[in-house]
Image: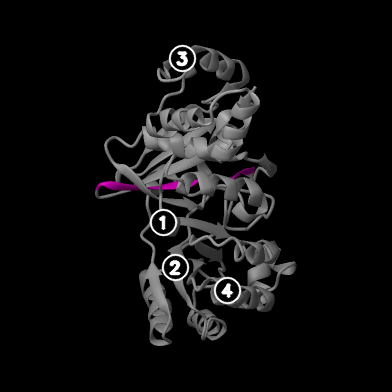
């Protein structure tokens, strides 16, 4: 059996034509699933009975099982999901007033082994299908408790651009009016800097946001933090980002995790301002999350503010991300790591 969410509208319409079924029923099916939250074909009461039966024989709707839910004092919720093959993935619901940002995973584990991140500690298992990615969002929507999901960020476990086709297919459904109807500019892909995929993304004609995990402004430090830098060094990455902004006319966000004793001092800020000069970008500073097994720590408040102020005075747009859900270990990979290790 196949997850029906692995199909987009055109694919389902084509299948229905092959079955001798009018194509308009495909929109009815997706309306029940994505807007109505229905997981049983037999409850889709405006469908012909023969079609209900055939759908039930060939597809399933829900393939995730909630294994564990953690709720932070700030309202952030983290979900550990079990897949049909018994692998585990995570997704996070981040509330703000009456809206929610959904943080989704794209892979089971991660192959890139960034030294400050829990996602890759257990290694890489496989890519998520587009249907599995959509089901994360589906569950978060059904657990939204009266709030509306308005933003989606691919910042959970995995490298989104390493699972390019499935992520882009999911994004088009997330954006579609027949499904989640979330605007392109409210969807963010966060990447560690896969240059060929960045170039490919620039040609998609999508107004989505691109965020690049930078974390250092010179190759030696970045390579020690992010081994991917040995394959795609900073000079090439920055050039690719400049080409991306020129082609798309979109600003890039650079994520920069501040780690005490490694990349949070004033000389690091000076190097960062130099390589970003003239680039249409902003910098999102993040205090590193403590992770069991990783010997990393946060800089103090003064060092953090000096770093930020130097960038601001250099003409760079800077934000300091407020940590959410630290009491429930909401950083990507932490819940799955703790659960599997048990």
Circle number at residue 42: 3
| Circle nearer the N terminus (4, 3) | 3
Q: Which residue is mark 2?
A: 284
Nearest to viewer (mark 4 / mark 2): 4
**Residue 101 forms part of the magenta stretch:** yes
Q: Which residue is mark 1?
A: 186
Span colored in magenta: 98-108
Q: SS of the residue at dot 3?
A: helix
**Residue 62 forms part of the magenta stretch:** no
Residue 311 image-quadrant placement = bottom left
Circle number at residue 247: 4
| Circle nearer the N terminus (1, 3) | 3
Front residue of 105 and 69: 105
Tell me what residue is drawn at x 47 percent, y 28 percent: 29
Position in image of residue 171 (x %, y %): 52, 49
The answer for how far apart the CA atoms under marks 4 and 2 are is: 22 Å
The answer for how far apart the CA atoms under marks 1 and 3 are is: 34 Å
């Amino acid at each position: 059996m196949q997850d029906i969410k692995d199909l987009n509208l055109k694919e389902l319409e084509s299948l229905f034509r092959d079955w001798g079924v009018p194509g308009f029923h495909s929109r009815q099916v997706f309306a029940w699933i994505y807007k109505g939250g229905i997981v049983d074909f037999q409850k889709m009461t405006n469908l012909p009975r023969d079609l209900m039966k055939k759908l039930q024989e060939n597809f399933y709707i829900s393939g995730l099982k909630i294994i564990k839910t953690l709720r932070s004092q700030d309202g952030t919720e983290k979900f550990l999901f079990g897949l049909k093959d018994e692998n585990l993935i995570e997704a996070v619901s981040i509330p703000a007033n009456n809206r929610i940002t959904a943080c989704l995973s794209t892979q089971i584990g991660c192959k890139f082994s960034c030294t400050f991140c829990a996602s890759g500690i257990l290694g890489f298992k496989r890519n998520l299908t587009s249907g599995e990615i959509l089901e994360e969002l589906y569950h978060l929507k059904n657990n939204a408790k009266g709030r509306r999901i308005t933003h989606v960020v691919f910042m959970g476990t995995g490298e989104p651009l390493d699972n390019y086709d499935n992520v882009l297919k999911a994004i088009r459904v997330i954006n579609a009016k027949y499904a989640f109807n979330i605007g392109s500019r409210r969807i963010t892909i966060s990447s560690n800097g896969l240059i060929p995929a960045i170039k490919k993304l620039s040609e998609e004609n999508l107004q989505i946001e691109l965020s690049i995990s930078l974390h250092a402004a010179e190759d030696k430090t970045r390579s020690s933090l992010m081994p991917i830098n040995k394959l795609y060094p900073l000079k090439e990455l920055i050039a690719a980002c400049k080409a991306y902004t020129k082609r798309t006319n979109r600003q890039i966000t650079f994520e920069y995790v501040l780690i005490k004793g490694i990349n949070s001092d004033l000389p690091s800020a000076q190097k960062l301002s130099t390589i970003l000069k003239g680039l249409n970008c902003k910098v999102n500073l993040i205090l590193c999350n403590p992770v069991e097994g990783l010997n990393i720590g946060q800089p103090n408040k003064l060092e953090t503010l000096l770093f930020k102020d130097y960038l601001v005075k250099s003409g760079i747009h800077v934000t300091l991300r407020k940590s959410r859900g630290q009491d429930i270990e909401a950083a990507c990979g932490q819940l799955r790591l703790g659960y599997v290790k048990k």
